[in-house]
Amino acid sequence: MSHPNQPDEVELAQTYFYGLLQNPQTQPPPGLDPQTAETVRWLVATEQGLSRAAQPQISAAQQRVWQHIAAQAQPAHTAKKVAATSNGRVKSKRLDYFDPNNSLKTSGQSVRAWGRWAVVTSMTATVVLIIGIIALVMVSTRLGESHAAATQPPASQATPSLASATVTKSVAAGPGNYKIVLQARAASPDLKQIKATLLILEQRVKTAGVKLISSTLQYNQQIVLEVGGVPDEKQFVQLLTATGRVEFIVLNNEQVAVGDTVQTTYCISGSLVQTKTALCQSNGSGRLNAAGQPFQTLISNESVDLTKVSQSNPDEVNNLINMLGKIWGKYSIANPNLGIAVVLDGQVKLNGVQINSLLSNSQQDKTDLVSLTTLLKYGILPQELEVVSSTPE
Amino acid sequence: MFFTRRHQAEPDAPPLDDALLLERAKSNPADFALLYERYFSRIYSYCLRRVGQPEEAEDVTSLVFTRAWAGLAGYRGGSVAAWFFQIAHNAVANHLRGRKPQISLEVAIISGWTDNLIEPDDGILEKIVQLEERKQLAGLIAALPPEQRELLALSVAGGLTAKEVGHVLGKSEGAVWMALHRIVQRLRTEYQRQFLAEESKTHEPPKPTR
C-alpha cells in the first residue's frame, strides 16, 4: 500500500473535492491516490444527492418561507393569518419593515428604529395578545359556521373520504379565477401533514395547467389557494380533493376486471421498493388474490416522481417502463410474461399489462400506461379535507 | 399577492456584491429580499440535509432569515455566506437538540420513500439504479460523527468554501482541510471493509486493495 506525502494528499483531495462541487465532471488531479479520488467522487455525489431537493419543492418552500417571514412583519391585526410552525420552535421577532401585503417597503427606515422597537416591545406584546385572543374567537366562530355548512351535500365532492372546500370567485380577478379554501377534516390536524398536503395541492394545480396565484396556510388547518384560468370549477375541485393513490400491482396468472376493487400490500407491507409509510390508509376491503393474500404492489406514486411522464415525453415513458421491468426482474421470479394491473384508490383502472410487451414496444400498452400515469402526477393527500360548500360567484 | 421578488422589477440591474447588499439592507429593507433570493436555496438545502424533513427545514430556514433580518446591525463585514450560515448552524443545532427523535434523511433514502427528493433532474430509471448503491454510501455517511456530517453539509449543501466553513465552525481553513481528509480516509476504509465483507459472503476472492 502506498503512503503518499500526507499534506500533498490532503491538498489534492480537497482540490478534487471542491472541484467536484463546482463541476461533477472534474477529473482527479494527477498524483491523487485513485481510491481516495474514488472515495471523494462518491462522497460528493452521495452527499449532493442527499442534500438536493427538487426545484419545484425549493420554489414552493421559498415562497412559503418568505410568506412566513413577511407575516412576522405584518401588523398584529393581520398576523392571525400566519400558521404556527410545526415544531413550535420558531418564535421570531416581529419585523416592522415589511408591509401588510408582504411586499417590502423601500422607505429607507433607519436602523435606529431598533432602539425604539425595543422600548415598545412589551406594549406591543400586550396588544398582540389581546388581538390574538380576539382572532382565536373569530376563528372558532368561523369553524363553527364551516361545520354547520358541511351538513349540506357538497356539490363537488370527489370521494367519500375527502370532502370540503369553499370556492369563491377571486375579487381581483380575471376569467376562471377562484379563491379556494380547504378545511382539514380532523379536529386537531397534524400541521406537518397539512403542510405536506399543501405541497401536493400545489403540484396538482400546476399539473392541471392552472395558474397558482398564491397558496397559504391559515389557522393551522385551512389551505387557501388562489388560482387563475380554471376552465371547470367542479372538475378542478374534484382534482384537488381526489385521493389519487396509484399502484402497479402484480397479477401473476390471475385475471382482474377493470373496475374491480382489490386489496394490495401497499398499506400492509408496502411495495417492492418501499416499505409501508405512516400516511398509508388501507381501505380494508376488496378482493384478494388466489392465495387469499393482497395483491403485491410493485411501486406506487408515493415512491417516484412521475410528473414528467406524458405522451409528449417518450424518454420518460421509456424510463417508467424500464423501471417497472427492472423492479420486476429483480424482485420476482424471472417470468416477464406475468401481468400487472394499474390500480387507482384500490380500483383497477388498467388490467393485464404485460411488462414484456411494454419492453418490446407495444404501442397500445404504452399508450394505455401513459394515460394512466397522468393520474400518478397528483399524489395522495396526507390530510383529509372537507368541502364546506361550492359557491362560485 | 404575498410573495414579491424585488429583483424582478430591476431585471437589467447589474448584480450587487453581497456585502454591499447586506450593508444597504440595514437601511433599506428591500435589499434584504435580494439576499433572500440569493441565499434561500443554499440555506434551505443545508437545513434539509441536517434536519431531514422538508417541513422542519422550512421552519428552521424561516428562523434563519428572520434572525438574520433582526441581526443585520450585527454584521461586521466579511463573508456574507459565512454570516448567514453561522446563523443557520446555530439554528439547526438548537433545533436538533430540542426535537424528538425522527427518521433521518439517510434512513428515508435507504427505505426508499424519499426517492423524489434526490437527483430531480435524472430520469426515473436512473433514480432506481442509483438507489442501491446510494443506500450503502448514505449509510456510511450517516455513521459519521455529527461534527463531520455538519462539515459535509456546510460544504456540499451549503456550498461554502473551506475558509467559510472554518469561520462557521470556529476552525482554521487548514483544520477544515484536515477534517475533510479524515472523513475521506474514514469512508474509504469503511467502504473497503464493507466491500470485503460482501465479497467474503459470496465466497469470492476479494479484490486487491492498495
Image (cartoon, coloured by chain):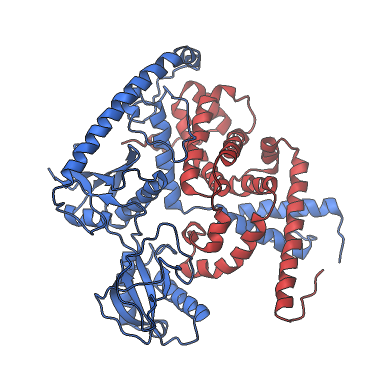
Viewer-proximal residue, A11 or A98? Answer: A98
Q: Measuring from the top left, give residue B94's x and y in whole percent.
A: 58, 36
Q: Measuring from the top left, give residue A212's x and y in whole percent.
A: 30, 47
Q: Does residue A337 sit above or below A234 in this rendering?
A: below
**Residue at x 36%, y 30% (from the top left corner):** A103
Viewer-proximal residue, A76 or B155? Answer: A76
Colour that chain A carries in the picture: blue
**Residue at x 18%, y 52% (from the top left corner):** A233
Viewer-proximal residue, A327 or A243? Answer: A243
Q: Measuring from the top left, give residue B24's x and y in whole percent.
A: 51, 24
- A277 left or right, relative to A194: right
Colour that chain B carries in the picture: red
- A146 left or right, relative to A342: left
**Residue at x 63%, y 33% (from the top left corner):** B79
Q: Is residue A5 visible?
A: yes
How many numbered marks, from 0 up?
0
**Residue at x 55%, y 25% (from the top left corner):** B71
Q: Is residue A173 visible?
A: no
